Image (cartoon, rainbow, N blue to C red):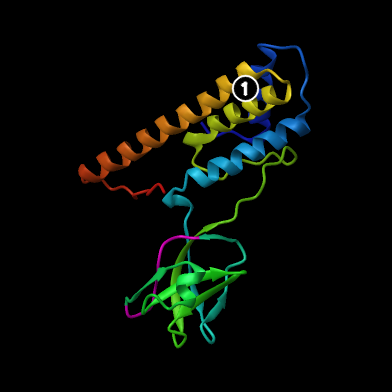
Amino acid sequence: MQLTTSQIIKLARAKILEQTGEIVSDETLLIYANLTYADLMRKVFTNDKIKTATLAFTGGSASTPLDFGTLYGSGQDVAGNVFEEVSIEDFDNKTLEEMITVEDGTIKVYPTTTANLTIKYYPQFEELTIVPATTPDVNDYFHELIVYGTVARAYEDLQDESLSIYYSDKYKKELAEKLSTQSNYEENNQRGGQMFTYQRLI
């Protein structure tokens, strides 16, 4: 089920009020929701969120796209040559004949004579807001997890260690189960020969 930020806050508050009469402000719950969301986005990278861009290089450098977050794998030129992503140190040491790296908002390529590369990247995501009510930019199968993470942080703030641990563990367990289910679902669809866009989880 796809949830908006307002619904996430409402569900989190309802779970908190099941156990305590203490009120946690919407602003505080929104902070906790965003902390959970940021954690979740780094753990659930699905192919439906990956973007593609063709970059023109000058002297071996090109600016990253405006919404660039994380490089997703290797780059490729028009001839089909693959440029593997490497660390800045490996790039400086020229460990491969064809490679790319990201440094300070710039994508660097070697050899520096390379004119164009097509890359895939994971975009930056906007923070959740209540007004206007945003929707998490992650597969809606994982939206419920933001509620659990928000509640865990709220109980930690309320100094209820047992409930904080309970919801934190629930968040981790549900995440592991959903990742496993998603992975199996995709794998079964591929084996069945159905029309399906594979979503690789990193």
Residue ID at (47%, 56%): 50
Which SS does the magenta portion mostly show? loop
Residue 49 higher or lower than 88, as above or below: above
* Image coords of residue 9 (percent x, y): 68, 29
Tell me, yes or no, whether the highlighted magenta stretch contains residue 181: no
Indicate the quadrant where residue 37 lies. top right
Location of residue 124 (image quadrant): bottom right
| Residue that mark 1 sits on | 164
Q: Secondary structure under badge 1?
A: helix
Instruction: Between residue 85 and residue 115, name the one nearer to us.
Output: 85
Q: Is residue 13 left or right of residue 125?
A: right
Estimate the x, y position of residue 48 in percent, counting from the top left.
44, 51
- State the residue at coordinates (51%, 83%): 60
Q: Which residues are magenta?
A: 71-79
User: Which of the two residues, 7 or 17, is positioned nearer the viewer here?
Assistant: 17
Q: Which residue shows up at 47% across the image and 35% down it?
A: 141
Residue plotted at (68% across, 22% down): 155
